[in-house]
Image (cartoon, coloured by chain):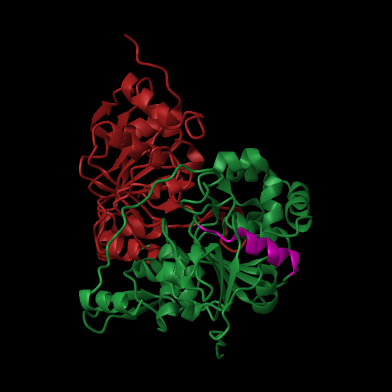
Chain colours: A red, B green
Amino acid sequence: MSAPACTPAELMVVNAARLLREGDVVLVGVGLPNLACNLARRLHAPGLVMVYEAGVIGAQPERLPLSIGDPCLAVGALSICSMYELFAHYLQRGLISVGFVGGAQIDRYGNLNATVIGDYRRPKVRLPGSGGSMEIAAWADRVYMMAPHRRRRFPARCDFITSAGFLDGRSSRRARRLRGGGPAAVVTDLALLEPDAQGELTLVALHPGVTIEQVQAQTGWPLQVAEDLRTTQPPTREELETLRALDPQGVYLG
Amino acid sequence: MTRTFQTAHHAGKLTTLAQAVRRLVHDGDTLYAAGFTHLIPFAAGHEIIRQGRRDLTLARATPDLIYDQLIAAGCARKVIFSYAGNPGVGSLHALRRAIEAGHIEWEEYSHFGLITRLAAGAAGLPFLPMNPTGADDLPRANPHYRSVTDPYSGRQVTVLPALKPDVAILHVQRADPQGNAHLWGIVGEQKEAAFAAERVILTAEEIVPPEVIRSDPNRTLIPGLVVDAVCHVPHCAHPSYAQGYYDRDNDFYLGWDAISRDPKGLAAWLEEWVFDVCDRQAYWEKLGPQVHARLALAPAWSEPVNYGRCSAAAEDREARS
């Protein structure tokens, strides 16, 4: 039986959801990470605690929130605190096990750019900026990123480092004594990348039907390939049906 | 600057939003219109546009549509922010155009950085330390970011100067005429903004007697002590929302992308929905019954809590009545 067809966004969300574990306390970001967390909580991780940077702890939204401050997040939540308390007591204090961050560029060492393309003062493209990602990337135990795999999105070095991955490699991040573990995986529509012992993002799994050459062609540095390169399981019917029910209008999933 | 309290007057600090803006928002002010997604005081933004304020420094974690509109209307000289996007949708196009064209100054932080600046301002401190993040490009671009040595461990901590806006505008679900305010749902940076600002305008869905406020003091996030003007403005927050009163108008946020992408369309929108509308009541009526129905909520009450009362006092009270 062939796997059900899905969009690139669905492929990323399903694979990101699989990275989440029962009991994780996840600081959820807007867009696709929002979907991945809501999907994981409805499938294999019902005890996953969703935390939103607006200050909501243990959200159980009945509908998919468009923003990270939607009213549906407040109804039935465990707790609501101020933004200062969220970032200080939960994130800086060290209670967040997983953070999602997103942006326009992800580089070889998992550094992220969500600020500008081009010069900071004379930007070619002005992006939204850090939001919570500067601190999430520094202090969450594990950090995940999702992005369509395009060469311009995966340069060797970001134009601007909004949030720290491994900086110039694991030792440089270690020297900064940040409490979080840094990037744990990058999920794209072609593959999964994970940092190696030096903190360099390497190819660890291909989605079905994708070749190493295709991934390399869309990556701005010579991509290392893991010895035990895997192929991801295609999204199941249950995963896709649950996911599509979360975004019935296809706002994010296309 | 000394505050003037009008405690003797039974109407307290009640006034119209137009009067409050006229009296308390001045050209050149640093404004913090608070509310993280929730309770954003859009009606106040529109009033500021109608009154033609200029050269404002607009500070907010998320400029949101309210500052996109103020920028498009030419009210701003500078914007201070930490996430300049339309949440879940994309760009704030008027803001982005103004920055990319060099028409506006900007000062940028992370959410934690900006909120910590407000928290320091609210506490009367020069700064509050934060742990370093390892991301150096923003601190390089914004000289307000500094490092100081923790005198106890000898390690570096990050500091930013306290933010003390000239005026903060806060919308709440209910307040008494003195500005003692209950709010619930997402509380964002409301409290910090109220305590940090020199002047505070409070808008409320409902004005209630002081007894209602005193029945649940844990819910009073904003005390009247820091409030200068109280305005009864139902539906003030649309297209943002008021928890328990009306829903977030997500369709409006999605639709704003096309409106703000086109400067002419945006100017026409301002003409129709801000300049040609006298106040929030007229705006809400103009939205029409279909929008009202779409944003209506089913109730979800919390369990009441019992504060108790010492029995002697209760007997005494009974005896007197």
Residue at the bottom extreme of this rendering: B2
Q: Is residue B294 above or below residue A229?
A: below
Residue at the top extreme of this rendering: A1
Residue A155 place in picture, x, y as percent: 46, 45
Residue A10 as seen in the image, left or right of residue B308 = right
x 56%, y 45%: residue: B249
Residue closer to the observer: B36 or A183: B36
Residue B245 place in picture, x, y as percent: 51, 51
Residue B308 as seen in the image, left or right of residue A124 = left
Residue B159 as seen in the image, left or right of residue B169 = left
Look at the magenta stretch and give its main secondary structure: helix
Residue A166 as seen in the image, left or right of residue B102 = left
Q: Is residue A13 above or below residue B267?
A: above
User: Is any part of residue B212 visible from this angle?
Assistant: yes
Toward which corner of the image does residue A231 lie, by quadrant? top left
Residue closer to the observer: B23 or A186: B23
x 61%, y 61%: residue: B233
Residue B316 place in picture, x, y as percent: 27, 79
Q: Is residue A104 above or below residue B33?
A: above
Residue closer to the observer: B207 or B50: B207
Q: Quadrant of the N terminus of chain A?
A: top left
Toward which corner of the image does residue A138 lie, by quadrant? bottom left
Q: Is residue B153 magenta?
A: no
Residue B310 place in picture, x, y as percent: 22, 75
Tell me how many marks there are: 0
x 34%, y 11%: residue: A2
User: Is any part of residue B102 visible from this angle?
Assistant: no
Segment colored magenta: B39-52
